[in-house]
Image (cartoon, rainbow, N blue to C red):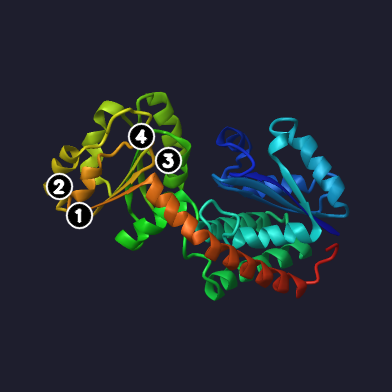
Amino acid sequence: MELVCYGLNHRSAPVEVRERFAVATSKLGEHALSLREMEGIEEAVVLSTCNRTEFYLAGSSAAEAAEALRQQLGAGGQDHWYEMHRMEAAQHLCEVASGLDSMVLGETEIFGQLKTAYRHAHEAGATGGVLNRLFQRAFGVGKKVRTETSIQEGATSVAGTAVELAEKIFGRLDGCRVIVIGAGETSRQTAQALVSRGASTVFVTNRSHDRAVELAEELGGRAVRFEEWQSVLAGVDVVISSTAAPHHVVQPFHVEAVRRVRKFRPLFLIDIAVPRDIDPAVGGIEEVYLYDIDTLDQLARDARGRRERQIAECRELITRELEKLNLPGT
């Protein structure tokens, strides 16, 4: 019995590719069970989130299983898929469970998504002794990594740094409301990161309304026409701005106009645009916290050295835990 992981994620494939292979949560068990009908596959779990679609398989031949899956998926997007066998596949699963493979390093949402994927596969009868043992070990490793290391501290990307700063301002982000002005890639990543940590409502506005609608659908939010974005400012906690405008889009009078309605609640503004979208004078308003791309990038760079040591520590822990498992074919 051998193991194989076949998948794509936010690093290997753009969203227009990932969305083509997404599997609805309600279909995860059914999809996993259908994989068992393919030659070389005896056990299967399907994981599908906004950032990844991965197939964890156990069978008499990992090569046969991967080839069967390639044939089922067809030619579309093949350059974006990765394939891991045996111990490499087991290691990857543990890193996913631990948040090491996430857009925001150490995020916790993926742990619940992985447990849901496994539960659906198990209830459908798609798993057996190998994947049952492996996934239970991965869940234990994920908890251990988060309790015995500092992997959730010190973000190393602009998106991660923004989320970390937001958590320092608001505490837990559950129920946090966000508006994204402009639909650039870094804005998308930052908004996704906020959603992964609990943000409940996302508004998206863009000069091209169709692009705003597209990003809003991806984030599970609502599109707002560009000329109307100020109407939602009173109700949000976070503003992410990244347009191509040659002038300031958000100015002090925009914020001053809604301060009383907001009851002077904290407002966190993330300016990712170059040239800047948000007038620096906005940062002088008492309850406003304004960060631009240079500040966020510097904070992220400062954390990278510390985080690299933490990642190495996490991977050593994962390796030790997997050695105890003695999986067949690894």
**Residue 155 vertical placement versus 315 (above, below):** above
Please identify, in this view, whether the residue under mark 2 or under mark 1 is nearer the observer. Answer: 1
Q: Nearer the viewer, residue 35 or 89?
A: 89
Q: CA distance from mark 2 to mark 1?
A: 9 Å
- Going by the numbered disc 4, the residue's amino acid type is Pro
Q: CA distance from mark 3 to mark 2?
A: 24 Å
Marks counted in the figure total: 4
Q: Quadrant of residue 85?
A: bottom right
Question: Does the CB distance between marks 4 and 3 fall below 8 Å?
Answer: no
Which of the marked residues, 4 or 3, is nearer the chain's N terminus? 3
Q: Which residue is mark 1?
A: 287
- Horizontal and vertical percent for residue 318? 68, 69
Which of the marked residues, 2 or 1, is nearer the chain's N terminus? 2
Q: CA distance from mark 4 to mark 3?
A: 15 Å
Residue sitting at 40 percent across and 51 percent down? 296
Question: Does the CB distance between marks 2 and 1 fall below 8 Å?
Answer: yes
Which of the marked residues, 3 or 2, is nearer the chain's N terminus? 3
Residue sitting at 68 percent across and 64 percent down? 135
* Mark 3 residue element: helix
- Horizontal and vertical percent for residue 66? 80, 45
Q: Which mark is residue 259?
A: 2
Q: Which residue is mark 3?
A: 187
